[in-house]
Amino acid sequence: MNLQFILLIFVSLASSAGLLWSLVNLWRAIRSQDWDQIDCVITESRVEIRPLRHNTRYIPIIKYKYSVIGLPYEGNNLKYGGTWSFKSTSYAYCDKYPTGKTVKVSVDPRNPKRSVLEPGASLRSYFSVIIAIAFGVVGLTILLN
């Protein structure tokens, strides 16, 4: 086996795995709009600050508890597509979901462990699928030429 063939296999597997992961998350995001809406209580609401080399990432951490058929569950999924964002947006999420507040959460009726505060697909959900496809196409184009 030559190096180009090994790289071709690696790029194909990596882009396929990325695409599959992105598609599953997009599918769940779209389906979450039809999930059951139930009450939950916000148990933690804060912004995690992660300094990076040239900037800082602000990540809203929102945790909540809910119960389905008397069984307790905990969740931390704010929305599909990721939640890192600008400083102001992250703090706005904490203002929207303060600790102790009761709000609605969307819960997957097939798997009550899966929940999300803001159902639906975000632009980032679609963007991750496009990036996975582009990565695969560019990688294969480079390797096959």
Image (cartoon, rainbow, N blue to C red):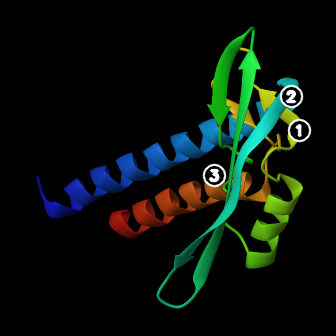
Q: Quadrant of residue 23?
A: top right
For the point 59% across and 61% down, which residue is it? Answer: 131
Mark before the other along the chain sequence, 1 or 3: 1
- Judged from this view, the residue extending furthest toward the bottom is 54
For the point 50% across and 62% down, which residue is it? Answer: 135
**Image x and y of residue 71, in percent:** 67, 13
Amino acid type at image mark 2: Asp
Disc assigned to residue 39: 2
**Image x and y of residue 97, in percent:** 83, 52
Q: Is residue 23 above or below residue 131?
A: above
Q: How far is mark 2 from mark 3, CA to CA?
A: 31 Å
Q: How far is mark 1 from mark 2, CA to CA?
A: 6 Å
Tell me the residue that label 3 is attached to: 129
Q: Is residue 108 above or below residue 32?
A: above
Label 3 crowd bin: few (<14), some (14–19), many (20+), radius 10 Å = many
Amino acid type at image mark 3: Val
Q: Assign a secondary structure to mark 2.
A: strand
Q: How far is mark 1 from mark 3, CA to CA?
A: 30 Å
**Image x and y of residue 87, in percent:** 74, 77
Mark before the other along the chain sequence, 2 or 3: 2
Q: Assign a secondary structure to mark 1.
A: strand
For the point 81% across and 76% down, which residue is it? Answer: 88
Is residue 108 visible in the rendered image? The answer is no
Closer to viewer: mark 1 or mark 3: 1
- Judged from this view, the residue extending furthest toward the front is 100
Label 2 crowd bin: few (<14), some (14–19), many (20+), radius 10 Å = some
Q: Nearer the viewer, residue 118 or 144?
A: 118
Q: Nearer the viewer, residue 22 or 100?
A: 100
